[in-house]
Image (cartoon, grey):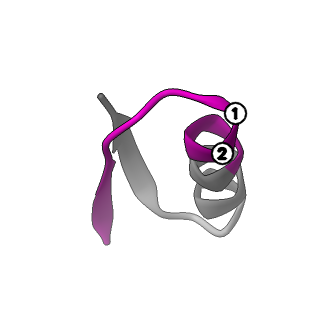
Amino acid sequence: MHILIIGAGIIGVTTAYELLKDGHKVTVI
């Protein structure tokens, strides 16, 4: 699954990292 995260603050980056560890494709804007 490809997930878009809007907001590159600490919460956005942490969420992206956790999703990447689970094998998802992540785009942070």
Taking the image as shown, residue 10 lies to the left or right of residue 29, namely: right
Residue 18 position by quadrant: bottom right
* Magenta-drawn segment: 1-14
Residue 21: which numbered mark, if any? none
Taking the image as shown, residue 24 lies to the left or right of residue 6, namely: right
Q: Residue 11 lies in magenta, yes or no?
A: yes
Taking the image as shown, residue 7 lies to the left or right of residue 29, namely: right
Is residue 12 positioned above or below 7 on the image? below
Residue 11: which numbered mark, if any? 2
Rendered-image quadrant of the C terminus: top left
Q: Residues within 10 Å of mark 2 (few under 14, many from 20)?
A: few
Q: Position of residue 8 (x, y in %)?
A: 49, 27
Q: Position of residue 21 (x, y in %)?
A: 71, 57
Is residue 5 positioned above or below 3 on the image? above
Residue 23 position by quadrant: bottom right
Is residue 22 positioned above or below 26 on the image? below
Q: Amino acid at mark 1?
A: Ile
Q: Residue at x 63, y 54 (%)?
A: 15
Residue marked by disc 1? 10
Q: Residues within 10 Å of mark 1 (few under 14, many from 20)?
A: few
Q: Residue at x 71, y 45 (%)?
A: 14
Q: Residue at x 57, y 48 (%)?
A: 16
Rendered-image quadrant of the N terminus: bottom left
Q: Are marks 1 and 2 in contact (CB under 8 Å)?
A: yes
Measured Cα–Cα span from mark 1 to mark 2: 4 Å
Q: Amino acid at mark 2?
A: Ile
